[in-house]
Structures are given as structure tokens and as C-alpha cells.
Amino acid sequence: MSRQITASTCCYCGVGCGVLIEHDGERILGVSGDPAHPANFGKLCSKGSTLHLTGDLNARALYPQLRLGKALARGRSDWDSALDHAANVFAATIAEHGPDSVAFYISGQLLTEDYYAFNKLARALVGTNNIDSNSRLCMSSAVVGYKRSLGADAPPCSYEDLELSDCVMIVGSNMAYAHPVLFRRLEEAKARRPQMKVIVIDPRRTDTCDLADLHLAILPGTDVALFHGILHLLLWEDWVDRDFIQAHTQGLPELKSLVRDYTPQMVSQLCGISVEQLQQCAEWVGTSPSFLSLWCMGLNQSTAGSAKNSALINLHLATGQIGRPGSGPFSLTGQPNAMGGRETGSLSNLLPGHRDAANAEHRAEVAAYWGVEQLPQNTGLSAIELFEQMASGKVKAVWIACTNPAQSMPDQTAVRAALQACPFVVLQEAFHTTETAAFADLLLPAASWGEKDGTVTNSERRISHVRKAIPAPGEARSDWAITVDFAQRLEKHLRPEHSSLFAFETEAQVFDEYKHLTSGRDLDLSGISHAVLDAIGPQQWPFPTGAREGTARLYLDRAFPTATGRAQFVAEPYRAAKEQRDARFPLTLITGRLRDQWHGMSRTGTAAQLFGHVSEAVLSLHPDELRRHRLQPGDLVSLKSRRGAVIVPVSSDDSVRPGQAFLPMHWGDRFLKGGVNTLTVPAFDPLSKQPELKHSAVRLEPAQLPWHLFALIEGDVQQNFETLRQLCETFSYVSFSLTGRERPALLIRAASASAPDPQLLREIDQCLGLNEGPVLAYDDPRRAIGKRVRIEHGSITAIRLAGETLARHWLQNLWQEGRADEQLRRWLLAPLSAPPGNANAPTAGNSIVCNCKNVSQSVIEAGIAQGLDLQGLKRSLGCGTQCGSCVPQIKRLLTAQAQPVAINP
Ligand SMILES: Nc1nc2c(c(=O)[nH]1)N[C@H]1C(S)=C(S)[C@@H](COP(=O)(O)OP(=O)(O)OC[C@H]3O[C@@H](n4cnc5c(=O)[nH]c(N)nc54)[C@H](O)[C@@H]3O)O[C@H]1N2
Ligand SMILES: Nc1nc2c(c(=O)[nH]1)N[C@H]1C(S)=C(S)[C@@H](COP(=O)(O)OP(=O)(O)OC[C@H]3O[C@@H](n4cnc5c(=O)[nH]c(N)nc54)[C@H](O)[C@@H]3O)O[C@H]1N2
Ligand code: SF4
Ligand SMILES: [Mo]
């Protein structure tokens, strides 16, 4: 078939960029930014622009698989038998143990139509509120914040406000990595109007700080104290909008008496910043003509997440900085359709149309619309509670869709035990490779990006039509269709005498039924349909019936959807994070995102190119901490929390403070033995029930693992991955990654206390193709050292080093360059394994900064040493000229020797 273009959206972050998918009707061939889409006007970041390189078919779930007993393996099934079986199990469980013995755990990455089908299934058909989503780990504190302070879960701003603002406060958000295309927009605005003030509040000095006039490296978890301290100064200096407060708010007196105690001295101490920094921050907030705040997980993922959100919104209410261009509290949504989830009621405590499950009137409205007698009254379980009740045996059947809890939930030991204990686990997944898939009794293959149709809402309330470009592979089906098919089968058990609640044939029909549940509500989007979006493009809600265009900003009239019409000041004291560092666990572990990986890496982890920036999970520690612990960069340590331990290499990184440590969130048990979330704490916020993923107490212990393994193999990456992962299970440290842009290869690093049984090494070699054929080998059994290299047509195709792995960087470079020369032969046959010359380059220098143009850090540093500036580097090396995601890092390399932006105490 000829080449075609389908306009759709990127399936990663909540910026919601429009993409043009190039395809031939069967395969996706390329992707570019959609110039007509108002979220990105043609731009894409390093993840969006590599979408077509991801999604290896060998990693995709292609047909239903069923296991008929925990001890058995899953076998191939077909849709009819699989869904009939699931309906039988769910019906029997509900009949015997009641509707609350089953649960649904879904995802902010589903489409609105998928959510709606799941909600109707759980609440109307099954009769349970046990339907929660991974947005509980992500946005639920923002939901509480908006509802408590403003009356509805509605971010009032537009992306355009980033360009119009005079003072932008970015707090608990690393936009440069997590919302890159929006960050580009802010960079451009600041370049045009350098007088615009940018404040970044983050314990770490992230790439986002590159744009900051002021970086407040507050101690983790102290945001509420900081916001109260700012308000204290705003009130003291009279930098407040008294008319606005008088006419449109309530509750200031209580808050005033609370923040009286938050003196600059006290706040400076609590937050670990200087009084001058605090004053500077308050002055800019209080005196700038417009003030916009942007926030993300640094606020939400906290046991004080709701308090942090409200304390920040307090600042907008005190200054009247809301409902005006360039101002307002603007929560950045993480997942592409977390907003749609909130709209359709996909948290256990919500109902469709921004309604509450605890509100009898709301329940009656939705029940009447659905034509069922009533909706369930029992409080539904939130994510952490749901897994607790799976472990305790109360939840006996769970349906998981589009999320990977065996990677992303905190306290993995407990989560995996819960999945193991639950009698029936259904998983609706696009990739069969995820950690959770191992626990699924029924695996249902889902269509994924480029293969499904529906709608999503981005951070600025803008609804886009997601369009299908190609058919899903194998027997994979769209999520809404799987859900509706299952629901129809379950209805035969639960409501045999009624007509179907799920008589949907297309996504558009699902949307049309859903949208009327928003009529007359704050988010009224009843004027939107798939056809309207096709005709006039993506639109921001509210968009009521009869509207011609969407709504860019809310609260222009200063009327808030609360009972009194006034916005609410919320007075809650600062409470420290749950797990403070102490003598036994002296470090605070922060977790967060990297630029080029997405969550558990089921998709991004299939593209070798996306490992170029950071190739393995490394613990960032301040140089002082390395010295204190007598560690060298690259050393393996055992990182322990009260819940478990993982082994990781350390790096020296002065962007974290002493007393803190940072680990990227992406590595689950598949890529790093144990996975990062083995360490994290399941404590959650009392109102939002969002867990404190950003903050756990840990300690370092030396990992005495002198025996090392390094291997590289070209070829079928997924196949090798599965086999080698099983073989490597006995090692204490195991880390997998991909490398190579043109010839993808799998990389393994492992370590253990002593040399393994030689038989195990032979099995590993067998998988690597190193037991026969054109293989050069050297073995020193006495020292348990061995090296093997396979050379085909003059190039290396597989490597295995055992015992010690000093030559790994050198060998990887030879492989990369397709060289297998005399030097290699000489080194191989020599008893000492040290690589020739000084070729033992550390990984940092090899890391790829610019993914689009494949330019490494060492090359950029060499350019800087020659005197090139940003423009010069762009011109001569090409780095930073395409998607721009690497520009903040290049600027940081440029200023590495100069004065840091932070005014550090
Ligand atoms: N590349 C990439 N982009 C993504 C994603 C991805 O996986 N990869 N995921 C998407 C999703 S779902 C989400 S939710 C967003 C998350 O986007 P962000 O929230 O921006 O990303 P994180 O790195 O999780 O955390 C942001 C920052 O919070 C800081 N922080 C930690 N503790 C505190 C604290 O107590 N106070 C303050 N003020 N800051 C603190 C961390 O140091 C970190 O730099 O990213 C979205 N975009
Ligand atoms: N330590 C730590 N842990 C964290 C965080 C943190 O900052 N630190 N952040 C938390 C946050 S904010 C979030 S949002 C979560 C994310 O956690 P998860 O939801 O577990 O993240 P993903 O890996 O994106 O999972 C989505 C899954 O859906 C699959 N999938 C993709 N497309 C489709 C589709 O169309 N249909 C179906 N059915 N499946 C599909 C993917 O293969 C993937 O396995 O992680 C949380 N966990
Ligand atoms: S910023 Fe990047 S990841 Fe987010 S939607 Fe746009 S292209 Fe996708
Ligand atoms: Mo998220």
C-alpha cells in the first residue's frame, strides 16, 4: 500500500502533542509533529519523535493467554473462551462473596471511551466502587487540591499562559524532562522576554533549573512550610489583592493566624534555604503583574500532597492571580489522558462528570442516566488499599488494564505478594513483557498507540481525537471493545432479564453516551463529538451543546463552583514526610523521571536509542556522600530501606544535596533485579490517598560482589532478554539495557559474591552463541576469569566477560565501531584482562546527550573546550537542533565551569 499520513496524538505525557503518523496501512514508518495541533504546533520531544522506533512486535501481546491454576503455565486461548471464562469467574466470585470481592485497576493512559466502559461495568453492572487507577499514584492530590480550594477539579489555565506570564513558579516538576515540549515553549518565551521571572523549587538542581532566575533547593517534603512562609511575607508586606480576597474568597482569617508562626527564620531553617532566597521568591510572587505556578509529582506524591496543593493555591487566592491571562495554578498532568480519567470518574471516590461516589444525589443522577436502580454506596478501594485487600484475601478477582503495578506501585514485596495471593488476575496489556504479566492468570492483548481510536484530554483541558493508523497486531483489540465484550458476557450472569447496558458498536457511540453525563456540570463537554473534533480540531472544555469553540481560561468572572461561589483558603499546618532519615537510614531517597524513558519501559525499553542518554539505573549521590562512604563512582552498593534492598552502582552528582539520593523510577524487576520500588514507602495522603513515592529513608551498605559478568549480544533482543533473565536470576546484581542504533544489542551487567557454577556460564554462553563457531576464548579457571568474543564477517556480534569486566567499555566501543582487529586478538589471548591503552572510558562520557543527532557528552565537552558556545555547538555538531530536548543539558555542560544559577545558602 502507498504511504499515508494519519493525524493522532503522542501516547506519552500530558502535554498531549499532536503527531502525524506515517504508515503504509500495515506498519508505522515514521512520526512527526502535527503543525496544526495547538498543544505543540509541530514540535515533538525525544520520546515523541522516536515513537515509530518503539514497540518491537516480539514484545507485544498478540493473543489471549489463560492459566488454569497458579502452578501452571499460561496457554494460548481465544477471545471467546477467554472472556467466557473471565465472566464465569467474576460472576461466581460476585455470587459467593458479593460485588466488593472484585476490583478494577486501570490507567491514566486509557482513552476516554475505555474509561467510560470500565466505569459503567464496575459501578452499574457489578455494583462496586472498587475501580481505581494509577492516577492515584499521580494526580489524586491535585484533584483534592482543586476541589477543596476552587470547588471543581478544573485546571483553569492554558498553555498560552506560559508565554504571557511575568512570574512562573515551577515547583516539584522537572519539566525539562517530563513535559519537554511545554518547556520549549517557556524557554522561547523567556528568550523573548528575559525580564520574565522563573523560579524553580526542587530539592535537586535539575535541567529545568537551567531556566531559573531563582532555584530553591528546599529539603524534600517541606513545600507547605515554604508556601506558608511566602504567604507570611505577602501579608506582612501587603503584597496581596484585598479586593479580590474580600469579594471572592473565604477562610483567610484562619489561615492568617496559622501562617503568623511561619516566620522567615523558621521557614528558612525548615526548608534549608536562606532568608534572602525566601524573600526574593515572595517579592516576585507578590509584585509581578501576573503569576503562574506549574507543578507535578514533587507536590502530589506526598503524604502531605493535598496540603501542598492547597497551600500553593492559597498564594494565588491571596494575590488574586487566577482567572487572568498569564496567571493561575496550573497542575501539569502526567499521563496522556489522566484528565479524561478524572472526567469520567476513574478513581474509586469519583463518578462520571466530576461527581462524587459518596454523594447520594450524584449517585442517583448517574443511576437514572444509566437506567439502573442504584449505584453502590460502599466506599471503593484506592490503589494501595486495593492491593492490601488482595493480599488479605478480601479481593478475589482483579482486572488490571494499561498499567504495570508490579513495577510502579510502592513496596513491591507487598504488591507482588498480593498479586500472587489473588485467585484470579486479569491483565489487559499491549506488551507481554511487563513485570505484572508474570502474575496474570488471563492475559488479554490490547491494541496500543497508532492502533486505536478515541479521545484524550491534555493538561490544558483540550480534547483531541486519537486516530487509528494501522490494525493492531495479532488478535489484539481496543480496550473499550474488550471491556464491552466482557461486560456483555457478564450481563448474562448478573442481569439476564434486562436489555444490555453495553450496546455499543463504535468508540463514537461510547463518547456520545458519556458526554451527556457532563451536561450542566463544570466540565460540560456535551457539544463535542468525534465528528466535531474532526471538523474544528482539538477543543478545550467546557464546550457545552451549541458552543462553537472551547474555553481557554476558567474563572474569568471570579465565580467559583463552590457552595458560596467563593474560593476557599485552606489552613493546614506543615507536616513532615512520613519516613524521615535517621541514624539507621540516614539518606532520603528521591525517585523521578529521566528524559528518554517512560515509566516501566515496556515501550521505550524496546528502542536501543532511548538508552543512549542513560543506560542503566544509577544512584546519584553528592560527592561528599561518596567520600563519607568511601565509594568510587561505578561501585556497586546495596541500597536498603525498611522494606527491601536493591543493588545499584553509584555516581557522583552534585545536583543532589548531601543527605539525599536520587534513583530514576523506570527500572522494574525486569531491567534491574528487584526494581526501584522495592524500596519505596506505601504511606499515603489522608485525603487523596496518593502514596509518598518521592520520599523514603534508605542507607548504603557495601555490596561485596567481586565476581562480575558483562555480556552483549546482537540479534533478537526480546528472545535473548527472556532467556538470559531467567539464567541470571541467581546473581545478586543484574541489570539489562539495550545499545546500538543501527544494530540493536542486549547488554547485561551482573555481579555476585563468588563465581557461579561453570555449568551456568556454559548455559549463558549457549544463549549468547559463544560455545561454538567463530569464537575467540580465553579462560583462567584458577582465577575464575574468562573472556569470549564472537566475530562474524570481521565484526564482533557477542561478548562475554566473566570474573572481572575492566575491558567492557573498550570492547563495547570496538563492537560499536564494527572492529575486530589484531589488538583485540592479542588482548584476548593475554592472561591479564585490562584493556589496551587508556580505553577504559567511564560511561558518563559515552552517554548520548543529543538523541536525534547521536552526539555524546564527550564530543560536546571537546567542542566546549575548543571554545564553542551553544550556537557554535549546534552549527558544528548538530546537537540540539532537532527536538531540542537536550538543549538544557548542553547549556548545563556549558555553564559547568561557570557560576551556578542557584543562590545557595
Ligand atoms: N520522560 C518522561 N516524561 C514523563 C514521564 C516519564 O515516565 N518519562 N511520565 C509522565 C508522568 S505520568 C508524570 S506524573 C510526570 C511527572 O513529572 P515530574 O513530576 O516533573 O517528574 P518527576 O521526576 O517524577 O518529579 C519531579 C521533581 O520533583 C522533585 N521533588 C521530589 N521531592 C520533592 C519535594 O518534596 N518538593 C518539591 N518541590 N520537589 C520534589 C524531584 O527532585 C523531581 O525533580 O511526567 C510525565 N512525563
Ligand atoms: N518510585 C516511583 N514510582 C512511581 C512514580 C515515581 O515518581 N516514583 N510515579 C508514579 C506515577 S506518577 C505513575 S503515572 C505510575 C505509572 O505506572 P504504570 O501505570 O505502571 O506505568 P506504565 O509503564 O506506563 O504502564 C502502562 C502499561 O500499559 C501498557 N499499555 C500501553 N498502551 C496500552 C494500551 O493501549 N492498552 C493497554 N491495555 N495497555 C497499554 C504498557 O505496556 C504499560 O505496561 O508510576 C508511579 N510509580
Ligand atoms: S512532550 Fe514529548 S512525550 Fe509529551 S506529548 Fe509531547 S512529544 Fe509526547
Ligand atoms: Mo504519573
Image (tube, rainbow, N blue to C red):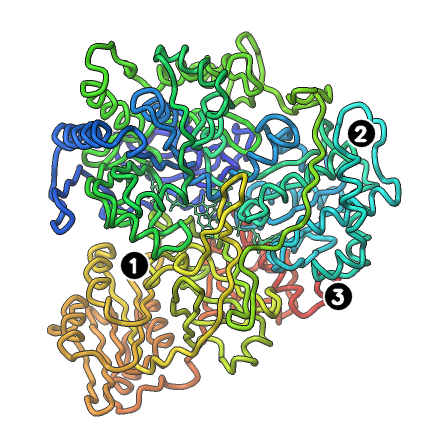
Report if the beta carbon of the residue with label 2 is closer than 8 angstroms to ligand 1: no
Residue located at (54% from left, 44% from top): 179
Q: Specify the amino acid type for callout 3.
A: Pro
Residue located at (29% from left, 39% from top): 395
Whether residue 188 is situated above or below residue 586 in the rendered picture: above
- Residue 441 lies in quadrant: top left
C-alpha separation, residue under disc 1 versus residue under disc 2? 62 Å
Q: Position of residue 855 (x, y in %)?
A: 49, 60
Return the residue nearer the eye: 61 or 606: 61
Return the residue nearer the eye: 829 or 877: 829
Q: How many marks?
A: 3
Q: Are marks 2 and 3 in contact (CB under 8 Å)?
A: no
C-alpha separation, residue under disc 2 versus residue under disc 3? 34 Å
Q: Position of residue 616 (x, y in %)?
A: 40, 64
Which label was assigned to residue 776? none
Report if the beta carbon of the residue with label 3 is closer than 8 angstroms to ligand 1: no
Q: Which residue is mark 1?
A: 743
Extreme-right residue of the structure: 237
Residue located at (88% from left, 40% from top): 238
Extreme-top residue of the structure: 546
Helix, strand, or loop for circle 1? loop
C-alpha separation, residue under disc 3 versus residue under disc 1? 48 Å
Helix, strand, or loop for circle 3? loop
Q: Specify the amino acid type for callout 1.
A: Arg
- Other residues around mark 3 within 10 Å, as few (<14) / some (14–19) / many (≥20): few
- Residue 246 lies in quadrant: top right
Q: Specify the amino acid type for callout 2.
A: Ile
Q: Which residue is mark 2?
A: 245
Which label was assigned to residue 905? 3
